[in-house]
Amino acid sequence: MTEPNKKIESLVRDLPDPEGARLFFERITSEHARAARAFERDEGLLSDALALAAWSPLLATTIEQNPEYLAWLAREKVLTRVREAEELGESLARFALTHTQAGAQGMLARFRRRELLRVYLHDIRHATTLVETTEELSNLADAVLRYALDLARQELENLYGAPQCTDERGRTTTASTVVVALGKLGSRELNYSSDIDLLFLYSDDGETSGAGERGALTNREFFCKLAERVSRIVGHPSGEEAAYRVDLRLRPHGRDGALAVSLAEALRYYHETAHAWELQVLIRSRAAAGSAQLFARFSEGVRERVYRPEETVESALTNVRLAKQKIDRFHTEESRGFNVKLGRGGIREIEFIAQALQLAHGGRDTWLHAPHTLISLGRLADRGHITERERGELSDAYAFLRTLEHRVQMEHGLQTHGVPDEAARRALLARRMHFAVARAQEDFDRALRLHTSNVSRTYARVFGTQAGAGSKTEETSVARDSTGASGRDASAQGESAPARSFREPPVEAEADAALAVAAASVFVRYVTGEEGGEGGVEVGSLARELREEAARSLNSRRALTHVARVAASLEKSGERVALSCSALRELVRLCGASDLFGEILTGNPALVPSVATPVEVLRARDGRMLMRSAVDAEAAFGAELSALRRAWTHLVVEIGARDVAGDLTQAESNALQTALAADSINVALLVARRELARRHGRLASGPRLAALGLGRLASGGMDYGSDLDLVMVYDPACPSPIEGMTCEQAYARMVELVVVALSSLTRDGHLYRVDLRLRPDGKNGALAISSNAFITYMNERAGAWEWLAHVKLRAVAGDLEFGRGVEREARAVIHEAARRAGG
């Protein structure tokens, strides 16, 4: 076997479709000499292109038809953070300048397909989470819609003049418009092949100025033409596929309604005419393009119709269940096999569980007004409307099923949701889901059965209550566990049942006394260790103590509101936590000082005792050991990330509590947070190293990599919410840790995983935002740079502003001996360069 063939075989060996990757390589290198040369120069690019081909024949074809995208991908793939719509809009504007021959429709389709190369590469490499992937896909759609809206409006104003209206002072002004995103785009959960559900609104009726070529139109006619034109630019194929399939059927009056409606008309429709399912749709709505102010007026105007304070649990669940049954009646399988979206235990059932409970309780609890499915599940669990077990099972199932949906759709770019029955295709799909080759299909089928059965069980529990006994109370519905059994036999658990079910008071409607009593009625059982509170603290006295401590805090209402939420979360979690009155006083003080810590403790009520950690213990705490011990107990990348986040949260709560209590000076707080950041980076490096070994086998040598801190991290001034400004430097004298890769490629992979470990958003949150933009050559530079190249850059090419940014450079994590050597050399180079520049 020739050397090139050996290289290809080593790269495709572990891919899900090695034969597809080989054929792609043969075709593109035989037809495009430039691509062949690029692969020879950059083995990392070759590896990424082969991976894309193995996971997506659609994207393999994209690369073959547009080999110039490879150079773009090599530059852009290194930045794994989510790109905002504004940043993507700038990229789109540059792309449009060089693709004028394609026309707007073809250009937008090509831009989207090019961006999918980067997004899907990060997806299959696990450089981004599901939440980040769907957010970036949504941002991409926003950028396309904004471009199309601006283009279409300019074209129409050239023909008819600007649409005008009269403001409240009688002045003539320009009417505004907004493209409202609904469905998955509305909740920023778009998939790779979603329709985009849109609603076009405009601010006021009136007429255009008539300054264009064809005279005046009514505003209604103008904005209907605008909606039609935007939909055609984005959704009509021209020589190739459309950028997106646009669906306007969710507008007022559906197919019979105008393509665009005024704000007044829309509000009237949703208040007087809309069906329950149409109001449910508005849970997931936001401004994708156009006037955010106009959408805010619309959202405020419909909120009380969507989330009605008088809504009963029974009515809300019945309406959503009927909507689901209507979908089921009209649903026909698009292919043989399980339908990931609409099948039993599928994505739609998870979404409807969340939305039904939001409608049932959202009128009395604004905190539940969260459009994103995973966020809403978390908040419903915090409020006790689903159990923590259900939350975990539904979240895991949602991540699995959405990823499965992505793999199915990205095979050929089709809007399909069917899992194939045919054995070979199903086995290939299982491998694309990262199941090990030997047992891929068996393990995949087992996982699919587990997740769908968990969803079905919770769906039956939530909606079955209404079906079986309409008189069931809200408390009974909430108390059911995930097996569907109401009122689980407490004696089987070895503990008595709670004396009452905690019902959290509305945040703004209840007096401080009611908040304190509600919280105390829960906490009293944990303080005494007895369910009834006999022989210990009484509810009344504890409530008074909570109110008195709240009055001494920075914000009494904020303190009691968060404390009540923490109490609700603690009771529903089932955690066996021993509390003291002193810990509760510390909790009140911390919640009164900070919404951040109030939310953290609501999501992690078992951490309440940590708010009373003595400052001497905190100062002696080995945060690195604590986080490493948590990670060491896990064996998979995702589990390690969750363990790291839980341990980090414990540590940051301890710091925050002592900080608010006044036991720490500002300098001490900053120093502890800086040490925590350094410890976190070290543990993230360990997690990344382990994941590299899982993916590539035992590492050929120990990585010699140092994290150099800049900004607050370098100066010891880290604070709550600070970013990590980093430069990652490796020792070129050591061999590459991954056999078959260059040092630059191997360390780039490692840094990608470090960034994911620190900054990716999971169910347990994230640690820090990581900023690598101050590395040599900024976003166009390598994620990890050799020490030689770094020093050369600082000596020969760095600008004066970079000298200033790097003058306080400090080795903070990784191989500190190596890092401090680089630090000293870099500082000497900077001082010498500054001296020369100064004459």
Image: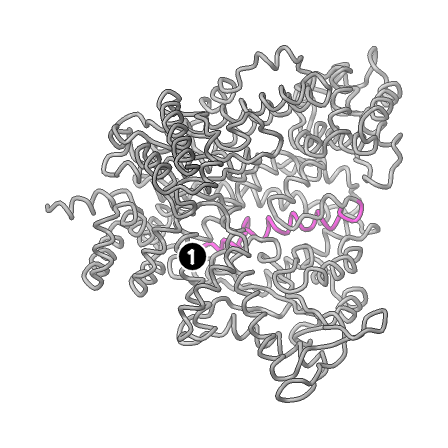
Residue 127 percent across, percent down from the top left: 43, 42
Q: Residue at x 82, y 12 (%)?
A: 536
Instruction: Give the residue type that dot 1 points to.
Output: Leu
Q: Is residue 524 left or right of residue 495?
A: right
Q: Quadrant of residue 216?
A: bottom right
Query: On screen, 710 above or below 128?
Result: above
- Of 104 and 765, the residue lying toward us: 104
Question: What's the magenta bit mostly, secondary-structure-wise?
Answer: helix
In percent of width and height, residue 202 lies at 71, 70
Residue 357 highlighted magenta (yes or no): yes
Hey, which residue is sitting farthest bottom in the picture?
214
- Seen from the viewer's position, the closer of residues 114 and 346 is 114
Segment colored magenta: 337-364
Q: Which residue does the image show at 34% across and 40% down from the upper left?
A: 796
Q: Residues within 10 Å of mark 1 (few under 14, many from 20)?
A: some
Q: Position of residue 679 (x, y in %)?
A: 49, 23
In this rendered view, identify the residue nearer to me: 747 or 630. 747
Is residue 640 in sight in this rendering? no
| Residue 144: % across, % down | 52, 64
Residue occupied by mark 1: 116
165 falls in the magenta region: no
Quarter in which the C terminus is drawn: top left
